[in-house]
Structure formats: C-alpha cells, structure tokens
Image (cartoon, grey):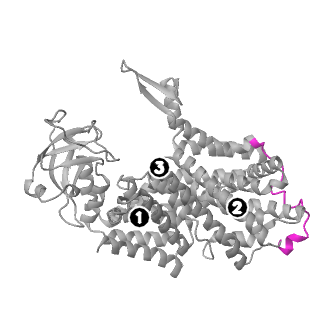
Amino acid sequence: MTTLGILGVGLFIVLGGILGFRLHAFVALVLAGLTVSALSSSGLVTRSAQMEATIRNVVIDIDRALVLTAKPLDDLKEIVLVADVADGQAFVQIGELDSQRPATDWPGEIPFLTADGQPSAKAHCYGLMLVADQVANSHDASQLRLISTMDFKAASALGKQTFMNRLTNAMGSYCGSLAILIVMASIIGRCLLDSGAADRIVKSTLSVVGEKNAPAAFVISGFTLSIPVFFDTVFYLMIPLAKALRLRTGGNYLLYVLAIVAGGTMAHSLVPPTPGPLFIAEAFGVSLPAMIVGGSIVGLFSASVAMLYAVWANRKFELKLPEEDSDSNPDSSIQITSGSQPSLLTALIPILLPLVMITAGALVAEVKSPDAASQWTIAGFSVEKDVAAACQLLSDKNVALIVSALFAVFMFVRVKRPTRDVFAAAMQDAVSSAGTIILVTAAGGAFGKMMRQANVAELLQGLPSSSPVILVVCAFLVTAAVRTAQGSATVAMMTAAGIFGGLVTSGAAGVAPLYVALAVGCGSKPISWMNDSGFWVISRMSGMTEKEGLTYITPMVALAGVSGLGAVILGVIFFP
C-alpha cells in the first residue's frame, strides 16, 4: 500500500474508533498503530529511517566524484553514499567518502551555495569512491544522499523487525521519556491545590490588581496555574472566584469566565510540563527551555487577543449567574480551601523552580582557551567545572520536575499536616490520574512513530520547498482538523506530530522545529464544541447553555489559536 493510503487508514481508525465506536483514545491509537505498522513494508520502513538519518547541507557532484559541505565531516570512513533505486524501497549503497583524499585544495574554484544562494568560500570538499558507477550515473543529485554507516545499518535492522516489535519498542521509548515528567507534574498540581498554594496565587494576584482589574488577574492566574495543572482543574478552582465577584460587582460575569478560559487554555497547549506541549517538544526535538519560552510568548499574545474578544462579548452579551448561586453570600465562594495557606513566594516555587533549573543548565557553556584548556561558564560568568556539571545534572528535565515535586510535597505536608491516610490518598490519586495520560501519550507517540516509519515525511517533503510558512500553516490546519473532529487537543497534537515529526526533525523542512511545535499547539485550539470535554466543563460550571457555549467559548478559543498561528508566522519570517 502507498504511504498516502496508509496515512488515510491510520487517521480513519483513530477518528472512527473514537467518534464512531466510542473507543478509549488508548485503544484507538494502539489499533491504528498496529495497522499502520503492519501495512508498512520492510523497504518503506528502512527508507524512512534512511531519510531521517540523511546528512543535510551537502552538495554531491557525481560527475567529478566530489562532496561539498558547509561544515567539515568528522569521520570520513563512517559515511556512505546511497542512491534511490525505486519509490517505496530502501536506498542502496553506491559509494563512500575517500578518506585518503580529503580535498582541501582542489584545482580551480568549486562554487558552493549557502542557504541564501550566495557562494561560500568556506566550503569543505571531499573525494568520492564509487562502487556502482552505472547506478550512480543514472541518478541525479536529488536521488543521492550521505548517511553514516551506523545509521545505514540501523535502518536496515529496523526494516527487518516485526511490526509488533516496532510498535512496542516505540511505546516503551515514549513511556521512558515522558512517564516521570507526567507523574511529577501531576503530583505538583495536586499539591498546589490541596495545600492552598493555587488559591494563594489567585487571591494574591487579585489583591494586587484589585477587583476592577480582576479579568487581567484571571488571565495571568489561569495562565500560570495551567502550566503545571490541567485546565479542567484550574477552571474548577477559579470559577467560584468569578461567581463571587459577579455577586459583589453586579455584572461582568461573562468577562470573568472568558478571562479564565483565555489564560488557561493557551498555556495548556503551549507551555510544558502539561502533557500536550511536553509531547510535541519531544516529538519535534525541541528543548524544554525553548518550548517554555516560545510557548509563553505565543500563549500570552494569544491570551491577550482572546481577552479583546472577551471584552467585546461582555459588552454585547450577558451571561446570567446560575440560580443556585444567585442568592449566595458574595464571600462564600471565595474560600476554596480551608485552614492555613503558604506564602505567595512559597506557592510559586513549585512552578518557578523547574523553569529556573532547566534554564540554568541551558546557559552552561564550555569555552576553549588558546592553550587548549577548557573554561566553564554560566550565562557568561566563569565557574568551576564541578559547578557546571552540577547545573547540567540538575537541569535535566526529569531531575528538575522531581525536585519541584519534592518541594511541593514538603509544602503540602508542612502547611496542611495531613494524616497518613489523607496524604497517601492524595498521592495515589495524582499518580493514578497520570497513569491514563501516560498510556494515551505513549500510544499516541507509538502511532506517530509508525506514521513516520510509513515515510509520511517524504509524502510531505514538497511542502517546505516553496516556503517554511506553508509547512507551519499545514501543521496548524492538520491539528485543527483532528481537534475539531474528535475533541481532544492532546490527541490532535499527537496525530500532527506523527505526520510532521520525521520531516521536521530530519531538517528537510527548512524551518526551526520550535515554530512547527508552536503551530501544532495553536492548532489544537479550534474548534471547541460538544465533543470537547473542556467545552462541557466550562459551560456546565459557569451555567451556560449549549448555544451560549458555542456563541461565547468556541469563537474565542478559535481566535486565540489563529492569532497564535499569526505570531508563529511572524517568527518564521523575521527570526528564521
């Protein structure tokens, strides 16, 4: 079966299984992954792995048996030249680099064009030894590739594996890379809620800006809390505050509700360590610091645009407070947690600590001095090697989240002093809720991996040839289509990662992986309607009817996603 046919079958099983047969997302994703894996031939799987491993930014001059590169190649003996012999089949080796002839001073000028089409004087030139001249002469440069010997052998070995082994290995890989992160994030979120830290953050923000600026406080609080806590939980936490302010001020209830949604929904899809952005960061090879910073910038911009809609909608429409809340004491809904609460600084530490730790590790650099000695720096300041090594260790995303979770647990225990049974129940609930997410995430990752092994990247490789913007827009549209069809933002992001992951991580897309990851996150917003659990949480908890939900929530969330895409496109154009 062709790659396009395999892609269609995979998407049909995922969407049909979830929508038509009401299957759990894990079951539908596993079935789709098994089917795609079984339909992918050995040659197609090998070819996909070879394309992902291709050495980029090289020019192959087959007539003069030369290879020109922008950067020097490390081990010439471990690089082979392969050629495309048939569509859907693996590349075959036709030559290797001549380690005896690194061509540093070839007679005459051999032009090498840089990415902007200008000749480069820094090109490195190497000789080629062909082992199959007839095959080589029958192909043009676009059908030739350089691959390391290790990757060439690994691709062949992957193609020989059974479809079940490939699926289970992919699931194990994703579980190993994400399980600790998701569990720790779940524990952090539970401790923030149960200790009263989340309540403290919201109330402190309100006390600073005042009731008049409560919508802005709701946006900021919702965005901040949705980084470690799931959006549904954040909305449960903050909706009583919106109701209480409505009773106190006598109006603007719709504005308060939409402000919570505007802040929380964008962070949920753009800023790790929530599962969706964490997954796409892994799938596209984006570092966590880059995803956190980029997601925060795009997310805050989108939330600001959404707030403009919320202000307009509040002037045009009126949302009535539910009858059961209309006779309540204005202060009764404010108290979400009982007993003592941590200070604001203490409440913020579980959120800020992993961000600081991960960012500090990214700032560690090794500088070579003229005497060949190494000097270690952090943000440009010299430090001892042991200090730099410690920062790099602590900046590991798993270590950072574990340390943050330990502090969150300590804060919870110290503030609330729960009994052993209460503490155990809280931790068990946090881990149990994370378990389902890990299963769905691993299954989605495996499905995406099987899509990549079906060589979807080659199917889409023509997209970036005209403009990186086209690829970013396509990633957004694919994610939005899947989100609209089946309702889950996380599943939509996983599906898009499976389609575009290989193309982006291989470097063939010609666009920074961060931009594609952010476009996928923004694409997971449109369209929120009746098949979205978040739609029901917002409408039922706020007292909206289905019609009101479609009138108020759906347009605002879609606008936030589209405006986020606009910000990403500007980044692609001005900061490629």
Say which element carries label 3.
Answer: loop
Cα distance between the residues tagged 3 and 2? 31 Å
Q: Please give the name of the residue rendered at 92% of the width and 64% of the height, measured from the top-left corner.
A: 329
Three-letter residue code for mark 3: Val
* Magenta residue check for 360: no
Q: Is residue 102 left or right of residue 322?
A: left
Q: Tell me the residue that label 1 is attached to.
A: 499
From which residue to which does the magenta span run? 321-344
Q: Are marks 2 and 1 in contact (CB under 8 Å)?
A: no
Residue 110: % across, % down: 19, 41
Q: Is residue 305 above or below residue 392?
A: below
Q: Is residue 332 above or below residue 62?
A: below
Choose the circle earlier in sequence order: 3 or 2: 3
Q: Is residue 271 visible?
A: no
Q: Main secondary structure of the magenta part?
A: loop
* Magenta residue check for 335: yes
Residue 396: % across, % down: 51, 41
Q: Please give the name of the residue rendered at 51% of the width and 38% of the height, measured from the top-left corner.
A: 362
Q: Tell me the residue that label 2 is attached to.
A: 308
Q: Which one is closest to the eye, mark 3 or mark 2? A: 2
Cα distance between the residues tagged 2 and 1? 34 Å
Q: Please give the name of the residue rendered at 60% of the width and 56% of the height, measured from the top-left corner.
A: 431
Three-letter residue code for mark 2: Leu
Choose the circle earlier in sequence order: 3 or 1: 3
Label of residue 286 in the image: 3
Label of residue 147 in the image: none
